[in-house]
Image (cartoon, grey):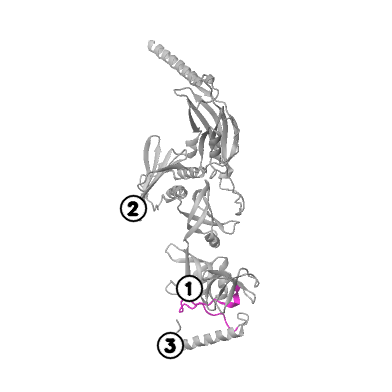
Amino acid sequence: MIRVRALATAGLVTALGLAQAEMAFAQAREAVEYTTLTRRVTGGPPFPVRAVLTSAEEYGRFFRTREPAQCDFANEFLILVHLGTEGSQGYTVRITSVERVQSNPPVVTVKYRLTPGAGNAGTVGARPTTRPEDPPVVAEAPAELIKVRRSQPRDRHTSAGIDLARDQLRFFEEGGMERVGFNVIARTLAGEGAFEQVTVDFTGDVKVRMGSGEPKKTRLLLSELDRMAIVAQNSQIKSLPRTVPTQQLGGRRFFFNHFDGARRRTIVEGTHNHEGAYADRIRPLSQAFDLILGRLERRPIQVEGLVELVEEADAVRIQGPLGLSYYLRGPLARKLVVLQGRKVVLEAVAQLKSSTEAEGVIRQVIYPQRSQIAGTIAQQGGKLVIVPAYPMPDAPIPLLGPRASELVTPEIGKPVMLDMWLMFNDRGLPNEGFVESILAITLSHVVLRDRPESQSMPTGELPERTTVWVSARRGGGEGVALAAANMKSGWVPSQLLRFHYNPKVPGLAEGLDPRNPNESGDPRLRGRIERELEDERNRSRNPNVDRPR
C-alpha cells in the first residue's frame, strides 16, 4: 500500500514537471512580426537560396537591379527564400513563421513550406522564340520576400524585431526531409584511371569531387533535387541487396551511400554497366546523378527512351523512365522524326527544367545505327524490303518510315544504295530500316535551288556524274528532288537524276531507263546513256574486256 502511494506521488510530480516544462518552453518561444513584400521576384541565382539583405547595395547586387527596395534599411532588413530562376516552374514557397527561442545566444528560426504545383508535372510551358535584336529576358522565380524590423536597445526584452548582432538566424523547411525522402545520398565511381564522387543532401547542397582534386561545393536546382527524390523513392535503395548482381564488363565500380542520421551505410555497389534484375532500379538513380554532373561539369549524358513528335520542326521528345521526358533540339532531332514510337539511345547536353522534363541538344545518335546499305529492292509479304548485297547477310530488311515509299517504290527489282537507321534483333541482325535517303547520280550539270520552284534562288552547282543523296523525290517532268553532295544541298529536277546503283562500281549510281522520254527529256542525253548501256552489255558478254573502275 505504501508502495502504491509512492508511485502515485511520483507520477503526480512527473506530470507537474512536464506541465511546467511545457509552459517554460512556450514562454521561451516568441513570434517575430514581419511583413510580406512579394511572393515572386525577378532575377537572382538559378538555384534556391535563403538570404538576409541588410542594405540597398546588397539588394541591388543580388537582383542585379537599380530599382530601390521597399525597405528602410536603417531600421529594417529583408529576409528572402528564393527557389531559383531555373528548374522551379510550378513551385510555390510560403514563410509560415519567424520565431525566437530565448537561449544563449537567442536563435531566430525562419520556417517555410515548399509546394510543387501543376507546372512541375512535366509541362514546361511555352518556349518563346526570340530574335537577336530583342532585349534580354530576365527570368522570374517563385520566392517570398519579407521585411523585418531591426531590434533596438529598448526592445531587448520584447519580441519586436531581430538583433542581427545578437540573434542567430537559421532557416528550416517544414517537411523538407519527408518531401525529399533522404538525408544524404552519394554516388562514387572508381576505376579505369578515373574517380568521381557526388554527394547530395536534402537541403539541395551538393559536393562534387573529380579525381584527386579538392571537392567543389555548390547548390542543386530545385528540379534536380526533386528528380533525385523521385528516383530514390522508386529505387527503394534501402531494400536493395548490399551487392547487386551485375555483368562485369570492365566498367568503373559504383557505390551508392545513404546517410541515415549520423550513421553511414553503403546501400548498393556493383559495376557501372549495371544489368540484370536490379537494372531498372539502379539505372534511373545513376541517370539522376549524371544529369547533375552534366550541368555542373558541362558534359553530355546518355538518353534512352521512345521518340515522340512535337510541334517544333527541329525538336523531338524522348520519353524516358519514371515519367522523365527530354525535349531535344538540333539538326539530329529532325532526323529522328521517322523513328516515332521507337526506342533510341542518344548522347545529349541536357538540363532539368522540372522534375519530369529536361531540355537540351542532341550531340550523337548511338542507337539505332546509321548505315548505308546496298541491295535489291523487292516486295515480300506485302512489305517493301531490301535484300542486302554481299558481304551483308542476305536476309531481307523491311523498309519503314514516311520516305520509304516515295524514295524506294519506283526502284523495285533494281539494286540501290540506301541511307537508313538500322534496328537490330536479339541476335544482332538488322530487322528494320527507317529510310533517310537514296543514292543517285546527276545525268548532266545541274543547278541546286533553295525551293522546288525552278525560279527559286540557286544554292550551288553540281557537274554531271556526281553522286548525291536524295531525301525527297516527286515524279513527272516537273518533279523535284532534294539532293546533297560535297557539302551542298538544294532542289534539282528529278529527271536529271538516276537512282540505279551498281555495287561493282563503288560510289557510282546508274540508270533510269533512257528510252522513256518522261524520265529523260533530252535526246542528246538519252543517246549518250544508250551508248553507255550498250558498251556495258558488250563488256558483260566478253569477260576479257576490262570493266571501268
Q: How many marks?
A: 3
Going from the N terminus, do you reach mark 1 or mark 2 first? 2
Q: CA distance from mark 3 to mark 1?
A: 24 Å
Residue 271 in view, yes or no: yes
Crowding at dot 3, Cα within 10 Å, few <14 / some 14-19 / many 20+, comes out as few
In the rendered image, the vertical position of residue 508 relative to residue 538, given as above or below: above
Numbered circle sitting on residue 193: 2
Magenta region includes residue 512: yes
Numbered circle sitting on residue 512: none
Which mark is nearer the camera, 1 or 2? 2
SS of the residue under disc 2: loop
Q: CA distance from mark 1 to mark 2?
A: 42 Å
Q: On the picture, is 216 further left or further right than 314?
A: left
Going from the N terminus, do you reach mark 3 or mark 1 first? 1
The residue shown at (48%, 75%) is: 507
- The kind of residue tagged 1 is Ala
- The kind of residue tagged 3 is Pro
Prevalent SS, magenta region: loop
Magenta residue span: 492-515
SS of the residue under disc 3: loop
Which mark is nearer the camera, 3 or 2? 2
SS of the residue under disc 1: strand
Q: CA distance from mark 3 to mark 2?
A: 59 Å
Which residue matches tag 1?
Answer: 374
Residue 301, position as x, y percentages in the image: 46, 53
Residue 387, position as x, y percentages in the image: 48, 73
